[in-house]
Amino acid sequence: APLTCITMAGRAVLRTALTALPALRPASRAALRPVAGAAPRFMSGRTPNPEPVWKQDANLDKIIPGNMDQATGIERAEMLAEMEGKKIFDGEEGITGPFGTDANPVMVESIYEERIVGCPGDCDKGNTAINNEMRWFLVTSAQPYKCASCGQVFALKKVKGHEYNF
């Protein structure tokens, strides 16, 4: 009669046999196992990048990770760009140049349709001292903006944004 039901004892024997199979492999397969001390390789043939020194267990109590080791996301992208001599954020210096008029406005670059701009005020008289109170306003791509204090004209120039992989 065909066996239609496996008893509990039969299941236990089957489970034991299946877990013992790796130990019963022929000795020829032992040659395929990695050699101790050899660098592991993936299917691509490349060896993985080594762990940073500060991550290795023996060094955890000796080394404090630096900023580059801990940085992630946009902060890491900014650090990597600065190492190459580039800046991904250009908000550190102000726009300098001739006084903006209706015929020749100051061009403000933006990847968006609008940008907040600050003007120190008495620009037409050359009085742009740091202690002047800044006047902040919104410049849009729809029309130029004229500063109510000094009359300087600002226009928005739309630029293409950069793509950063971080």
Image (cartoon, rainbow, N blue to C red):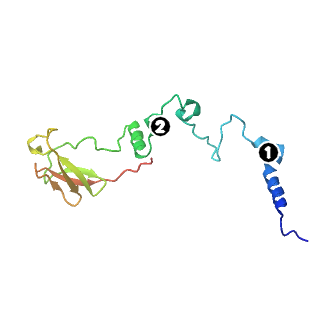
Residue 107 percent coordinates (x, y): 22, 50
Q: Secondary structure at mark 1?
A: helix
Q: Residues within 10 Å of mark 1 (few under 14, many from 20)?
A: few
Q: Residues within 10 Å of mark 2 (few under 14, many from 20)?
A: few
Q: Secondary structure at mark 2?
A: helix
Residue at image location 64% in from the left, 45% down from the top: 42
Query: In the shown orientation, is residue 45 left or right of residue 93?
Result: right
Residue at image location 45% in from the left, 34% down from the top: 66
Quadrant of the rendered image containing residue 49: top right
Residue 164 percent coordinates (x, y): 41, 48
Is residue 25 visible in the rendered structure shown here? no
The residue that label 2 is drawn on is 69
Circle on res. 6: none
Quadrant of the rendered image containing residue 59: top right
Residue at image location 14% in from the left, 46% down from the top: 99
Above/below status of 139 relative to 34:
below
Residue at image location 25% in from the left, 41% down from the top: 93
Q: Earlier in the sequence, mark 2 or mark 1?
A: 1
Mark 2 and mark 1 in contact? Answer it, CB < 8 Å.
Answer: no
Circle on res. 29: 1
Identify the amino acid type marked 1: Arg
Query: In the shown orientation, is residue 41 left or right of residue 106?
Result: right
Identify the amino acid type marked 2: Asp
Q: Quadrant of the N terminus?
A: bottom right
